[in-house]
């Protein structure tokens, strides 16, 4: 009991269980070997990495290629999209504005965005900047509000008002990128400029991060990859962000992220930047809401007792030490930043392969090596977990289909289903026939659905998260709507 309480105290206060530092003679060969083994195991074409410690860059290197079957090599200057690792850039921008007395973490969103609204009256009225940045508004993920959307972030935030809250306001952690972006809109309002210009002015220029952008440059970009049908990497189409998004639009390099990590680990140190916002930066690294330590989290973090979310950062204990981290994932890429603040230690790993747990496995392996922890085969461990969780998800998915088939027996004419449907947040969707399948089209996205011979349609698709559609009829016997699970999690009404 005392040990558990001490670990909780450690997580919340940052007190160290045991003071540890990396070896004086940095084991460069061992680090390189771990990186190469990780890339081979997960079939990653290219990777860029930086390790910092006590204000110094102790390792910085590129591995593999920018694009499979092409000669260009990844270097520490190769530019990657860092996806949701961008969130800490946005909260740091807010921290800078707060230090200048232009903003406060506990300002009501309505103070700066009078048009802001959620489906719950209390949430609309009392939602604070801190709530947006810590994912505790009560609104579920709804990633397809922003993913490949042609709408600017403000319009996506406006659409969120038409979605019901899945949890009571401020009661639970639910990762929500659209409302996080609303925090960036607040920064624009009080800063009197665009997100891109403010980030450059307040964060990137002071830190001399000259190769970090929110609009992707045309040169020196890594190409994204996925595993093809034969299990080998294939190039993916680049993700097109139609306008800068404060939740995930930053592009950077391993070298620039070394400057970022050093600053985050020691924000009061004036040698990094004369920014005078150390207290506000450290506030982003404090727990704001508990991250439920469910069975999946326990599998992936066996040496963790508690997890929480700060503002743009995940906070947890790792083998008794306080750890701050965040991952990022977008079409063709996976990124991971992790820090052990009490040792002023940080790692950034940027890889051009999607849907892999390599970044987390490699980060753990490097920490274990450099802090002399007991070694674990993280790669096979995570691979086995992925297999088991995939099998379990498939079983539950099929069981749900069987239950729905029992609940909705009978047949339905696919020709009666085709047409346009509408949801106030997502806009128009279309169901049309593609051979023997129905295709659901939503903006730039689509998914092909099979019919179970009743009112149930289903599809296996990562973007839509294996959706199941339940069709409903009106009193006239005609299809009036469909309710869809997965990332959409909404009900669409058929248009006349």
Image: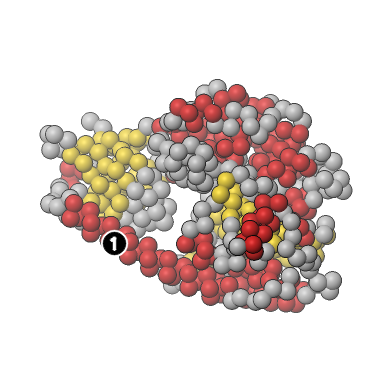
Residue 90 position within the rendered picture, expressed as x and y whole percent measured from the top left: 65, 41
Residue 316: quadrant of the picture: bottom right
Which residue is at 52% across, 46% downward?
Answer: 173
**Residue 58 in the image: above or below residue 164:** below
Q: Quadrant of the C terminus?
A: top left
- Name the spot of residue 302 as percent of width and height, x first: 56, 67
Q: Which residue lies furthest to the right in this view?
A: 271
Looking at the image, is 175 positioned above or below residue 1? above
- Which residue is more in the foreground, 244 or 468? 468
- Residue drawn at 67 percent across, 27 percent down: 190
Task: Please give the name of the residue rendered at 75% of the width and 28% of the height, measured from the top-left corner.
Answer: 101
Foreground of the two, 267 or 30: 267
Viewer-closest of 75 and 266:
266
Q: Which residue lies furthest to the front in this view?
A: 1
Q: Quadrant of the N terminus?
A: bottom right
Q: Which residue is drawn at 83% across and 57% down?
A: 55
Callout 1: helix, strand or loop? Answer: helix
> Where is residue 393 shown, x and y percent of the image?
37, 62
Tag 1 residue: 398
Other-residue count near label 1 (Cα within 10 Å), few / some / many at <14 / 14–19 / ≥20: few
| Quarter residue 339 falls in | bottom right
Whether residue 347 is visible to the viewer of this picture, yes or no, is: no
């Amino acid at each position: 009991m005392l040990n558990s309480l001490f670990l909780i105290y450690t997580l919340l206060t940052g007190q160290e269980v045991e003071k540890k530092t990396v070896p004086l003679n940095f084991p460069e060969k061992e680090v390189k070997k771990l990186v190469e083994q990780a890339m081979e195991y997960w079939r990653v074409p290219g990777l860029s990495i930086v390790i910092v410690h006590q204000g110094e860059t102790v390792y910085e290197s590129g591995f593999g290629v920018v694009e499979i079957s092409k000669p260009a090599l990844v270097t520490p200057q190769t530019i990657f999209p860092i996806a949701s690792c961008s969130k800490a850039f946005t909260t740091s921008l807010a921290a800078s504005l707060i230090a200048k007395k232009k903003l406060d973490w506990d300002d009501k969103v309505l103070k700066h965005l009078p048009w802001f609204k959620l489906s719950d009256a209390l949430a609309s009225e009392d939602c604070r900047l801190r709530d947006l940045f810590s994912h505790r508004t009560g609104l579920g993920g709804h990633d397809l509000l922003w993913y490949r959307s042609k709408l600017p972030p403000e319009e996506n935030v406006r659409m969120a008002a038409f979605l019901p809250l899945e949890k009571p306001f401020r009661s639970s952690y639910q990762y929500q990128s659209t409302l996080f972006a609303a925090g960036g809109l607040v920064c624009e309002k009080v800063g009197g400029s665009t997100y891109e210009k403010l980030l450059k002015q307040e964060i990137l220029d002071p830190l001399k991060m000259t190769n970090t952008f929110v609009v992707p440059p045309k040169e020196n970009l890594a190409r994204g990859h996925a595993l093809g049908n034969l299990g080998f990497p294939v190039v993916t189409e680049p993700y097109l962000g139609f306008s800068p998004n404060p939740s995930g639009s930053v592009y950077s390099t391993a070298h620039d992220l070394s400057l970022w990590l050093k600053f985050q680990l020691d924000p009061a140190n004036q040698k990094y930047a004369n920014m005078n916002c150390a207290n506000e930066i450290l506030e982003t690294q404090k727990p704001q809401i508990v991250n439920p330590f469910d069975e999946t989290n326990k599998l992936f973090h066996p040496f963790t007792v508690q997890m929480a979310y700060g503002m743009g950062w995940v906070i947890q204990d790792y083998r008794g030490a306080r750890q701050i981290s965040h991952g990022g994932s977008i079409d063709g890429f996976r990124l991971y930043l992790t820090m052990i603040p009490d040792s002023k230690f940080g790692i950034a790993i940027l890889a051009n392969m999607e849907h892999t747990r390599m970044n987390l496995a490699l980060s753990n392996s490097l920490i274990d090596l450099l802090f002399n922890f007991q070694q674990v085969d993280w790669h096979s461990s995570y691979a086995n977990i992925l297999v088991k969780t995939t099998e379990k998800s498939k079983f539950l998915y099929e069981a749900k289909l069987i239950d729905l088939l029992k609940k909705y027996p009978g047949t339905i004419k696919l020709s009666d289903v085709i047409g346009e449907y509408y949801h106030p947040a997502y806009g128009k969707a279309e169901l049309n026939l593609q051979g023997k399948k129905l295709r659901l089209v939503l903006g730039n996205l689509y998914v092909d659905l099979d019919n179970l011979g009743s009112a149930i349609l289903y599809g296996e698709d990562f973007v839509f998260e294996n959706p199941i559609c339940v069709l409903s009829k009106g009193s006239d016997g005609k299809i009036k709507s469909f309710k869809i699970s997965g990332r959409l999690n909404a009900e669409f009404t058929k248009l006349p």
